[in-house]
Amino acid sequence: MDKIAVEIKSFVRASVVYSFHEAVGQYRNYGRIIRKNEPERLLFLAVPEAIFKLFMEEEFFRDTIEEDSIKLLVFDKNEKEIIEWKK
């Protein structure tokens, strides 16, 4: 069984790019802390399904997610359920 930590982001700012920049920075910082204190724990960035679709459409987002090895948890914000885990 995996131990996880989840950083949930709603991306409500006017600029999705700025929200993404902020989320990636927090993800990196939390990742450093978790690797140091709880190396067995996996960190995920939780994003709404609509934002995930945008990420997959835009090369900038896809490249950053891949290069930084960001693990994603995609959720349906209306149904409040997980749709997909992307390790």
Image (spheres, rainbow, N blue to C red):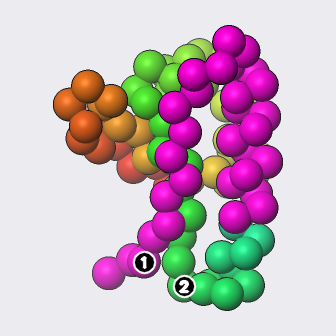
Q: Badge 1 is on which residue?
A: 3
Q: Which residues are magenta?
A: 1-30
14, 74: nearer the viewer = 14
Give residue 4's quadrant in the image.
bottom left
Kind of residue indicated by mark 1: Lys
Count every numbered label the image shows and give the total: 2
Measured from the top left, where is residue 65 in percent x and y?
Answer: 68, 41
- In the visual, does 77 lie left or right of 57? left
Q: Secondary structure at mark 1?
A: strand
Q: Badge 2 is on which residue?
A: 40
Measured from the top left, where is residue 70 in percent x and y?
Answer: 64, 51
**Counting residues from the N terminus, which is met first, the one under dot 2 or under dot 1?**
1
Residue 75 in sight in this render: yes
Above or below residue 57? Residue 47 is: below
Q: Residue at x 29, y 43 (%)?
A: 82
Q: Residue at x 76, y 71 (%)?
A: 32
Q: Residue at x 58, y 27 (%)?
A: 11
